[in-house]
Image (tube, rainbow, N blue to C red):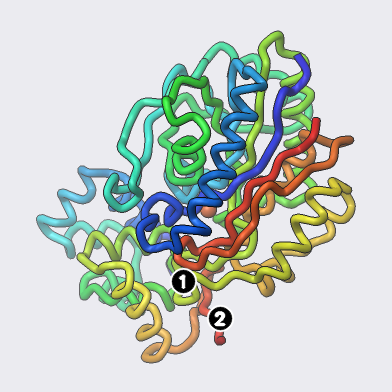
């Protein structure tokens, strides 16, 4: 479990234009600098926003990454729902989905 | 000078970013309450406004997460978010390094606070300022309580921080106003975005208005998470504002759930 590294990668993309530029040039190379599991790496690169959500990425970080990868608000919300359908409940963090 | 103003307001990004999608009647009533708060702050003639916010990884991350932070710069910048998305243009916001330094030194005698000579504002501060100091001509002193990265700042410490800010403000020759910002119940950036627990909110606001310490501090994080979502952790900012006004009671000038804003929209003021 390396949720910290995963969130750090995404946080830096949100806040640091240089990181963003490096990531855009070669996403895999950029991501390899972080200690990620294979599942986390795949979720970042696909990108699988739903899986990132299930892995426990804080919503205040993930919503900006979703926007960076071109997801509009409603598509982002749906991607999280789809993630839970495919991968099961959120595994960590404080942004779990509530069943209504 | 004794603290000249204390209040609380919502800060959800939808308040400005999705304003066109809200029911105009309730939205305009909410904006009207914000404007009433602006007038009250202006009438108090503050030399500086301390904004106790709950930021969302704009400056602080889990590599070095402070329980509390105060800004110490002559100017700040915000918003960090996309201007279109938030509906607020990026700008410089005035600060006062020397005043911050004096305040921080006094707060530190009671609460271990981190200071930051650089601080970029996110919606947690920019949305309130958009309404409360729309000309950006009021000196701002940003304050932060960790409501995002567990372990979170305990409620009892949020109260202590509010008390420390009050003592510091009272000892300054300047006139200091204070606003706490945040959600009550809400589930932002989750599939449940738009969900609001109105009954929980109203009970919390009743306790906030009565300003009884024990009632405000009796919430557990497990209970808050269950009933009010992770957004409910931001009650820390409301609690700090109440503590800053200990001895006074408050009034809720506005409360209404506005789902497209993803929060029960709130304006509350303490009668100092
Ligand atoms: Fe917030």
Q: Indicate whether B195 appears above or below A31.
A: below
**Residue at the left extreme?**
A25
Task: Report the chain holding disc 2.
Answer: A
**Looking at the image, which is closer to me, B126 or B23?**
B23
**What residue is drawn where x is 17% and y is 60%?**
A29
Q: Residue at x 80, y 56 (%)?
A: B206
Say if residue A34 shows up in the picture.
Answer: yes
- The image shows a total of numbered marks equal to 2
Badge 1 is on which residue? Answer: B190
SS of the residue at dot 1? loop
Residue B238 position (above or below residue B94): below
Residue B52 placement, left or right of B96: right
Across and down, in percent, residue A93 comes to 53, 68
Label 1 marks which chain's residue?
Answer: B
Quadrant in which the N terminus of chain B appears: top right
- Where in the figure is residue A87, as x and y percent of width and height? 40, 88
Return the residue nearer the eye: B135 or B140.
B135
Mark 2 secondary-structure assignment: loop
Marks 2 and 1, how far apart at CA: 9 Å
Q: Residue furthest front?
A: B25
Q: Are marks 2 and 1 in contact (CB under 8 Å)?
A: yes
Quadrant for the C terminus of chain B, please: top right
Residue at 44%, 58% (x, y): give it: B24
Task: Establish whether labels 2 and 1 are both on one chain.
Answer: no
Residue drawn at x 65%, y 68% is B228
**Looking at the image, is B253 positioned above or below residue B69?**
below
Q: Is residue B59 left or right of residue B30?
A: left
**Disc 2 designates what residue?**
A98
């Amino acid at each position: 479990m390396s949720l910290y590294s995963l969130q750090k990668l995404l946080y830096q993309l949100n806040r640091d234009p240089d990181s963003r530029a490096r990531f855009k040039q070669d996403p895999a190379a950029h991501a390899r600098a972080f200690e990620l599991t294979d599942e986390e790496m795949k979720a970042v690169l696909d990108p699988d926003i739903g899986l990132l959500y299930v892995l426990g990425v804080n919503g205040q970080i993930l919503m900006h990454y979703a926007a960076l990868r071109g997801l509009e608000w409603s598509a982002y919300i749906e991607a999280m729902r789809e993630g839970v359908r495919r991968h099961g409940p959120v595994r960590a963090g404080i942004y779990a989905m509530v069943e209504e | 000078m004794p603290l000249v103003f204390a209040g609380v307001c919502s800060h959800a990004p939808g308040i400005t970013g999705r304003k066109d999608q809200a029911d105009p009647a309730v939205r305009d009533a909410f904006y009207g309450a914000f404007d009433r708060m602006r007038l009250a702050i202006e009438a108090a003639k503050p030399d500086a406004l301390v904004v106790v916010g709950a930021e969302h990884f704009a400056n602080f991350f889990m590599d070095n997460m402070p329980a509390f932070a105060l800004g110490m710069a002559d100017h700040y910048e915000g918003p960090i978010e996309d201007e279109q998305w938030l509906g607020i243009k990026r700008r410089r916001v005035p600060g006062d390094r020397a005043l911050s330094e004096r305040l921080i030194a006094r707060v530190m005698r009671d609460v271990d606070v981190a200071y930051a000579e650089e601080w970029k504002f996110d919606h947690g501060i920019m949305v309130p300022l958009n309404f409360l100091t729309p000309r950006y001509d009021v000196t701002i002193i940003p304050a932060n309580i960790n409501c995002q990265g567990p372990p979170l700042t305990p409620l009892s410490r949020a109260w202590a921080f509010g008390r420390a800010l009050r003592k510091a403000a009272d000892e300054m020759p300047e006139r200091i106003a204070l606003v706490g910002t945040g959600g009550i119940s809400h589930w932002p950036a989750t599939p449940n975005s738009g969900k609001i627990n109105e009954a929980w909110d109203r009970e919390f606001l009743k306790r906030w208005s009565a300003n009884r310490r024990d009632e405000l501090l009796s919430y557990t994080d497990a209970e808050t998470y269950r009933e009010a979502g992770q957004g409910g952790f931001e009650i820390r900012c409301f609690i700090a504002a109440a503590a800053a006004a200990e001895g006074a009671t408050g009034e809720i000038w506005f409360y209404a759930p506005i789902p497209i804003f993803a929060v029960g929209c709130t304006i509350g003021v303490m009668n100092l």
